[in-house]
Image (spheres, rainbow, N blue to C red):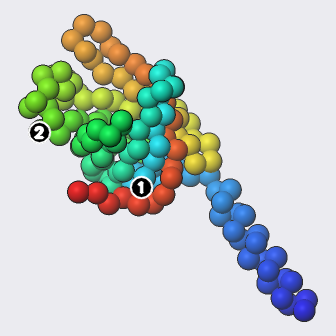
Amino acid sequence: MNKTIFFLFFICSCILHAQNKNLTCLDFTKGEFKSINDDNATLSSIIIRNGQKQLEITNQEYTYKKIHWLNDCDYSLFFSKKDSKKDPFKKYINHNGGIIVKMVKIENDVLYYKTSYFDGKKEVTSSGRLIKISNNSSFN
């Protein structure tokens, strides 16, 4: 009986410890995330990322982006060639360094970030959060 109670206590402790584990930048290189734009609370996306590419789903629209990692935490996003051919603004963003994403902090399963890009006249900045949903990183 004591062994059973100890075993159950041990398993529960392991599960609780695993759930409270703080993530690192590397945990945000692959997986499924909810992205919330802090500057526009109604704008949120689902992001599926596999390391070098990501799929963003916003209001039933699918956007593919290439990721260029600057270090373990910061990266540049570039629109797919297909998207940038159809949209001159996306093409302009790609040719001017992409969208720079810099990690601000990580708390539990949330990465806080700031973005910036040059729109031709000024630098446009924004901030948001990536909430890790799962480790699923597959998409077409």
**Mark 2 residue element:** helix
Foreground of the two, 3 or 61: 61
**Mark 1 residue element:** strand
Q: Position of residue 104 (x, y in %)?
A: 52, 32
Q: Residues within 10 Å of mark 1 (few under 14, many from 20)?
A: some
Q: Say which quarter of the image contains residue 137.
A: bottom left
Q: Quadrant of the N terminus?
A: bottom right
Q: Say which quarter of the image contains residue 3.
A: bottom right
Q: Residue at x 39, y 27 (%)?
A: 115
Q: Amino acid at mark 2?
A: Lys
Residue reaching furthest to the left:
85
90 sits to left or right of 110: left
Q: Quadrant of the C terminus?
A: bottom left
Q: Which residue is mark 2?
A: 82
Q: Position of residue 74 (x, y in %)?
A: 39, 38
Q: Which residue is mark 1?
A: 31
Q: Position of residue 29 (x, y in %)?
A: 40, 51
